[in-house]
Each structure stands twice: as C-alpha cells, then as structure tokens.
Image (spheres, coloured by chain):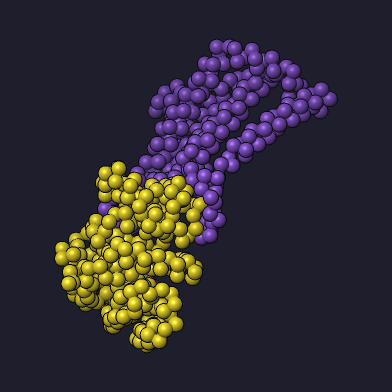
Amino acid sequence: MESTVAAPVKTESPHTPTPVPGRRRKRPSTGLLSAVCTFGLLVLGCLFWHLGSALAWWSPATIPPLTEVTPALVEILGSGEFWGDAGRTGFEIAIAFVGGGAFGLLVGIGFWKAPTIGRVFEPYLVSFYAVPLVLFYPVMIVIVGINQWSVIILASIMAGIPMALNTWVGLSGLPPVYLKLARSLGCNPRQTMFEVALPAAAPFIVAGLRLAVVYALIGAVAMEFVTASAGLGFRIRYLYESFDTVEMFVYVLVVLAMSLALTFLLSVAERALLRGRAGR
Amino acid sequence: MSQPGIQISDLSVEFAGGDADPVTAVSGVSQEIDAHRFVSIVGPSGCGKSTLLNVVAGLQQPTAGSIMIDGKPVTGPDRRIGLVFQEDSTLPWKTTTDNVAFGMRILGVAKRDQQRRAQEMIDLVGLQGFEQSYPAMLSGGMRQRVALARTLAQQPSVLLMDEPFAALDQQTRILLGAEVRRIWRQTKQTVLFVTHDLSEAILMSQQVWVMSYRPGRIIDVIDVDLPDDRDASVVSTPAFNELQNRIWSTLQQEAMRGFVAESTAA
Ligand SMILES: Nc1ncnc2c1ncn2[C@@H]1O[C@H](COP(=O)(O)OP(=O)(O)OP(=O)(O)O)[C@@H](O)[C@H]1O
Ligand SMILES: [Mg+2]
C-alpha cells in the first residue's frame, strides 16, 4: 500500500521558531533557481545528445541526431494531424483526470463514512491497482465499442484508484480533535465535511491528485499505444512500426514535455492549495 | 449574590465496554459551580475527568443525571459552552485571524463582528503581530493561545478546559496559566478546568475537586482562599503548601488504588 499512497511529509515540532510576520517571502528566489536549473539541464541534455550523435556513440537508427529531430519537430507542430492526435489525447487525459479524480474522491469519502465497507474493499482496490488494466480492453470494446471511451474509462480507473486511496487515508488519519471541535461547535454534516474534514485531509488529497494526473497520462498514452487508432500513443507505435525513428522521437519528446508541464501545473496548484502549512 | 453557573445533578456515565465488563467512568456526581467561578478537577489518570467534562459539554449523553448551565438544561452541543482541548486544535490551513473567527463563522456571527471580535481576542491573548501567521509558524504555546481566543470569541458563558496545557513545557504552562487567570478575571466566565497538576489547580482556581479512581466520584472539595491577584510566587507560602498537602493526601490513596487496579487487570 505504501507505493500507492504518497504521504505528505509532516514536520512538526512544538517549538517552531517564530519568524517576524511579513518577512517570510523567500519563494521567488527558490522558484527562479529551479527554473534556471531546469533550463541548464535542458541545455546540457541537448548538448550531450548532439555530441553523442556527432561522435557516433550510438547509431542514428537508435537515437536520431538532434539536427534531424528539430526540423521534424517544427514541421510536425505545424501539421493538422499532430494537433488532432494531441487534442484527442489531451481530451482523454483531461476527462480521465477530472472524472477519475472526482470518482476517486467520492469513493474515498464513502470509505471513510462507512469504515466497514472501506475495510472490506480496500484490499481489492489495492490489488486492482497492480493489474495491468489494458487486459480489460477487450471487455471495454464489448461494452462501449471501438472508440476513445474505452481508453478514457480505463485511464479514469487508473487515475481514480490512487485518488480514492489517498482521500481515504487522509480522512481516516484526521486528528480526532478536529471532529470534536466541529461537533462542539454544532457543525452540520456539510460544514464538518467542507470546513473541517476535507481541508484537513488536503495534503493527502493533493498528493492523490498528483498521482491521478500522472496515471491518467500513463493510462491514456499506454492504452492508445496498445489499442487505439488515433492519439499520441497510437502515433508513436505507428511511427515505430514504420521505422520512422525521427518522427517517433518527436512524438516521444512531446509526450515527455506534456507530462513535465502537467507535473509543473500540479505543483503550482499544490502550493496554492496548501498555503501556510508546515514545510510549504 | 450567587447565580447558578454549572449544576451537575446525580450524574453517572457507564461505558458498555463490548465483551469486557462495563466501565463506570462517572458515578453519582452532584456538584454546583456558581456563575463566574473558577473550579479545577484533579484526579488519577483514567478516573473519568474527560468523561465528566464531555458530558457537561453536551458531547456525550450521561447514563443518568442531568446538567444545567445558567439554569437551563444541556441536551447537546451548546453555544453557551466553550471548549479548549488538550490537543492542538488550530486548523493548519487558516491564519490566526481566520482560526479565531472560525467558531463565530460556524455559529453564524455577522461578518463585521467576526473581524472586530477576532482582533479583540487576538489582542487579549497577546498575539498581536501574528494575525496573518499560519499555525505552522507558531509555537505550541501560541497555538494554544489561538485556540483559547477562538473559544473566547464565541462568547460562551461557560468555559471547559481539559488539560489545555498538558502538551506544553513547564515554563509555557506557567506563563499560559497566568494568562488564562488574567483573562478570566477580565471576562469572568464560569470555568471548569481539568488538570493532573496539583499546583496548577491550586494556583489557578477558587475551588478544587478531587476525583476518585473508578468509579469516578468527587471525594473532596477544597476551597482555595488565596488572594485573588495571586501570582506564581504563592507556591512558596505556607497556605499553598497546606492546600497541596491536603489534596495530595487524598489523591495519593486514589492514585495508589488506581495503580493497583490497573496492574492487576493487565
Ligand atoms: N468511549 C469509551 N468507551 C469505553 N470506555 C471509555 C470510553 N471513554 C473513556 N472510557 C473509560 O472511562 C474511564 C475514564 O476515562 P477518561 O478519559 O474520562 O479519564 P481521565 O480522567 O480523563 O483520564 P486522563 O487523566 O488519562 O485523561 C477510563 O477507564 C476509560 O478507559
Ligand atoms: Mg482525560
């Protein structure tokens, strides 16, 4: 279970040094530093790539040279086919993330509200997680037909499970005193949920969101790779099968860039959502 | 002169205990606290202090007996009652101001009053300058001040505190205890304060109740006739010592009894 639940690090000490309020904006400099580092790494990577190709450390059939990939990238980014594929994959990821995430959140809340059900189903959820879901593709085709919904459904399940587990773990780990406080104030169930329980579990829920977005992407691209007839994953397989290494590399790079961008967006959202908490 | 503050009548609480024997945590407690008075409860660990306080707070139903606050019965969570918990109950996603206003928000106090009253309470507990800080940036003692301010901002007529300083270090305890006393002399709520620290109980309160090991009864009631504006220096006076000895002699037997019962049960 540890592997499926990213526990947020909690640093707690009763004697946190108390800074003078209003003198605590150190973020921009670390943000800038990491941006500079990322850029530096990118340049280094490209340099290494170029050098490796130029000095023939690997054959161009394995990794095509940067000089060929760059113009191909420019050309592909200008083509309608690319945007069709990217749009389809992006749509699948978005639906899987939002749908799977929301469903996972509800399941997590349900498990918390009904602990018996939670205890009964949790092992199944965890083991379901370990099943290569692509195996269910034939079943999906029978149910929804050959279209992108089979990809979306499977990616949603992949995104939903870590979300459900994280939400559940976060809610079950609530300090009892928060619920006692809510009760003593006479909170109604809605207030208890939205004013106390969910915000208190937010570090876990946000960690779940991060996993959900990653799994939505992995799920969508992998499923396309194996099964679909359009989308970035499909295109990569297609180009690979027609030995078009250069173009295939372009698409691989695009998927990499996409996952980096999504991770970055989520970390920005995380910082906003968890403002003020220990270690942030 | 005296109005009723908290009236506890013939109160008993029993826990079913599943397959184990039922536990009688509180048994036949009848006590009264006049309005605006400060009473502490001391007793051995596990004797039922928290249970008694929870029942007075309306968070738990008694098996028998009843509670009246200001002459009216308590039937459930009640806005006349303010609670301060032992654990850190500040909400980590809220600033000091928002934490202090939280109780008022739930109770539906008007927005404008919330801001004004929150600021008053922040000043009262001495947290000026930390309005926009999050709990993660505050020390344990400061967070407990935030929790106290939140409770006071609800303007309860009764304040119930269950070992509010137990998680703090000795110096912070003494300082915060003096603060609570200063604030109480200003706001004059009826206070029921649970502690297992004898000198804290004597230092803070006008009356100390000693509770027995299970079943929890009030076996001794001691009036503390030390000056009202006492400070920590009274601990070295003979009067203080006398009180401490009297409470300790009662408590010691109970603590012993509890210790024996607990170790034979294990
Ligand atoms: N929900 C419960 N179910 C069963 N037994 C309980 C429950 N809550 C408390 N008890 C039992 O009732 C007794 C009194 O508990 P309580 O928490 O009131 O003691 P306490 O005086 O506050 O102890 P401490 O000083 O350790 O805080 C204990 O023996 C405890 O085991
Ligand atoms: Mg207790």
Q: Is residue A23 visible?
A: yes
Chain A, which colour?
purple
Residue at the farthest right position? A55
How many numbered marks does the figure carry?
A: 0
Residue B96 x/y as whole percent? 42, 50
Q: In the drawing, does residue A1 fall left or right of residue B26?
A: right
Please indicate whether residue A28 sits to the left or right of residue B150 in the image: right
Which residue does the image show at 40% across and 36% down from the upper left? Answer: A102
| Image quadrant assignment for residue B254 | bottom left
Which chain is represented by yellow in the image?
B
Identify the image quadrant of residue B199. bottom left
Kindly identify the residue that appears in the image at 36 percent across and 73 percent down.
Answer: B229
User: Which x, y percent locates residue B204?
Assistant: 36, 73
Q: Is residue A111 visible?
A: no
Q: Is residue B114 above or below residue A66?
A: below
Q: Position of residue B239 (x, y in %)?
A: 37, 85
Task: In this rendered view, identify the residue nearer to me: A144 or B250.
Answer: B250
Q: Residue at x 62, y 39 (%)?
A: A30
Q: Nearer the viewer, residue B244 or B66?
A: B244
Q: Quadrant of residue B235?
A: bottom left
Which residue occupies 77% across, 29% down?
Answer: A48
Give ligand 1's quarter of the image: bottom left
Camera-nearest residue between A110 and B162: B162
Residue A221 locus on image (x, y percent): 54, 28
Give the answer, above or below, for where A268 lies relative to A171. Answer: above
